[in-house]
Amino acid sequence: MRGEQYLLLPGPTPVPEKVLRAMSMPMINHRGPEFKELLLEVTAGVKKVYRTSQNVLIYSSSGSGVLEAAVVNFISPGDKVLVVSIGVFGDRFAKIAAEFGADVQKLAIPWGQAADPQAVKEVLDNDKNHEIKAILITHNETSTGVYNDLKAIRAAASHHPALFMVDAVSGLGAIDLQMDEWDLDVVVSGSQKAFMLPPGLGFMAFNEKALQVHRQSTNAKFYWDVSAGLKYLEKGQTPYTPAISLFYGLRESLALMQEEGLENTLDRHKRYRDLVRAGVKALGLKLLADERAASCAVTSVMAPEDIGANQIRKFMLEEFNIVLAGGQQKLDNVIFRIGHLGYVRELDLLAVLAALEITLVRLGYKVEMGAGLKKAETMLLEYHR
Amino acid sequence: MRGEQYLLLPGPTPVPEKVLRAMSMPMINHRGPEFKELLLEVTAGVKKVYRTSQNVLIYSSSGSGVLEAAVVNFISPGDKVLVVSIGVFGDRFAKIAAEFGADVQKLAIPWGQAADPQAVKEVLDNDKNHEIKAILITHNETSTGVYNDLKAIRAAASHHPALFMVDAVSGLGAIDLQMDEWDLDVVVSGSQKAFMLPPGLGFMAFNEKALQVHRQSTNAKFYWDVSAGLKYLEKGQTPYTPAISLFYGLRESLALMQEEGLENTLDRHKRYRDLVRAGVKALGLKLLADERAASCAVTSVMAPEDIGANQIRKFMLEEFNIVLAGGQQKLDNVIFRIGHLGYVRELDLLAVLAALEITLVRLGYKVEMGAGLKKAETMLLEYHR
């Protein structure tokens, strides 16, 4: 009996039963009063997670779709843009911008590290004629398990007029992000991460400055056009038929987030990160991410070289029904990634540590049985006073 | 007690309980073996509905998103395209093509009529240098309740090398469409119509000829890029995180369609159309669509001028919890539309006719009580031998 799977990916994440059930509601008219009420309610709820009073639109698409939406709405062909990339998803943002005609200047940070605010500032200082029209940056880099200190980086870029555009698909709701307070111009996110929903909805928040830029933008756009989105939102509608079931789910997941309280949610994700990192280190394994920039959403663990990450993942899946993510591109078989965002219980993380210990022993790695578990349990003892 | 709503829109349509429940399945890894199996199974199932052995990709988006996908993949800026428009959705296809740089020539047919194959042929005959690169046409025009005879139109265009691209969002599965047999090059559809699913998935089928055109296409593309879709499909994946819940639902709805049998499904939709049209006519009301081109998915009814369509819809919603669609653009308040596609029971259509009779009487229209019902019941008697 394998029982329910432990889904510990950096997305899709586990979905609460209540949310899954809400998605079974019968269909309604997407141009009628019930959907209007639903749309306005969830839009207001999403704004709270973004900590913004600016515009928020909800797209029926994957998170990557909303990255494209950000590019086609706020960047025009020929625009010079600075992409601060700390991994696969930073590179993806750069790829999309280039595809839609931007002149991309990439500030590539070694994988495992966060961007240094000072380094960003220097690039912008050198752009004396303000040729750079937008700065594209990742909030939480899922491929490495590193997050950027957006507050500090934004402050370091505040003297430059470029739009500050953030991919917060995997970070929003797990790691602090204050759109208005930090003056972020465009922030995109997705449903299948800290929002505890299945994939299929993308969120885009943008302020008035971004909207002004959009009005002059020359990229062709239809499905992603924020002007259409805003026009229909005024009527309590979306321009095209929305994924109604996911909107029902979103209402429930926002209620759960509201119940926990955003500060508590963020604290919980920090605790999860600290627990996983301490437990893994107690086993003698190394972590990819710098201590100061370690993601609260996902932890990248360096596998012992002679074993390899994929063998560990395979054993844990087959023996314990635990799903972990592998490394991407040059990190394939080098790291495995433990997702700990969204609807994850703290004791599930102990289960993973136990399974990891057993796996390592079985695969011939010298480990002191119980060391990781004990470390994690001691930390839980502290949390529960 | 208002009970369950009668949702009789041309989309979203009612979703079977079994499908809704399938959508409550827990999340899985979209890069793992379970999703691979699911994706390959539903892709094969969708191909059967299309009657094609060509490429089929499934997008997490609204149907309108897949219209954009068709344009950016198979049309390049500067290409001359012929859009055969018989209503709002034909105009939308033209709008998208123009937005992405096509030189649009529109063959606009009066609303309520289907396109005449001969008229299409004449336009193509005049294009002696084969400047027209694509013909864009709607299978079923939801705004008017008219369908095009694609087989005849395709045959009339067969001497011309332009790609034949079909918006079958609301028609596929309700009205005959044989992609391979009729040599249709690109056919897009959506989940929330005859597929009996909630909105949120779009389907795109395209043949080798279209793929060759795609390889030369110059529109910028990322999220919609069929090359990425095909590459990932080979691995049993989608390029970006898919709306997993809807894929679960799709598996169930395809099983239901398989159980009924495509021929039976098409016959059933024809019967629904005939029943609704005969019932409405027996009440003395006029129908917008030509008899020969009347849609099997939705019926447009001309409201008595002195009452107006919207008052009728309002009364039926408030008194009977029946949701009908209104007219769009110049047909607003002129027609109301009864959707009868997907998971609709024949007796529900009698309920609608009864409610319509009562509504008309209450709004002061002279109608012989029971005339529509009797006509419809007589037809049902014939069906059930």
Image (spheres, coloured by chain):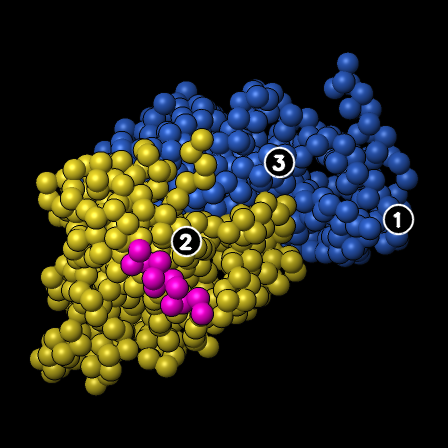
Chain colours: A blue, B yellow
B90, A332: nearer the viewer: B90
Pointer 3: what residue?
A16
User: Of tags 1 and 2, which is closer to the observer?
Assistant: 2
**In magenta segment, residue B382:** yes
Q: Position of residue B216 (x, y in %)?
A: 32, 72
**At 27% across and 56% down in the image, what residue appears?**
B279
Amino acid at pointer 1: Val
Number of the label disc, if any, that sits on residue A361: 1
**In magenta segment, residue A367:** no
Would you place residue B349 above or below residue B382 in this image?
above
How far is disc 3 from disc 1 in space, using C-alphas? 33 Å
Number of the label disc, if any, that sits on residue B347: 2
**At 29% across and 59% down in the image, what residue appears?**
B375
In what quadrant of the picture does the C terminus of chain B appear? Answer: bottom left
**At 60% across and 58% down in the image, what residue appears?**
B35
Is residue B158 visible in this depiction of the protein? yes
The disc, 3 or 1, on the residue closer to the chain's N-terminal end is 3
Q: Write down the region rendered in magenta.
A: B374-385
**Contact, CB < 8 Å: mark 2 with mark 3?**
no
B96, B50: nearer the viewer: B50
Number of the label disc, if any, that sits on residue B166: none
Amino acid at pointer 3: Pro
- Which quadrant of the structure image shows residue B134? bottom left
User: Of tags 2 and 3, which is closer to the observer?
Assistant: 2
**Contact, CB < 8 Å: mark 3 with mark 1?**
no
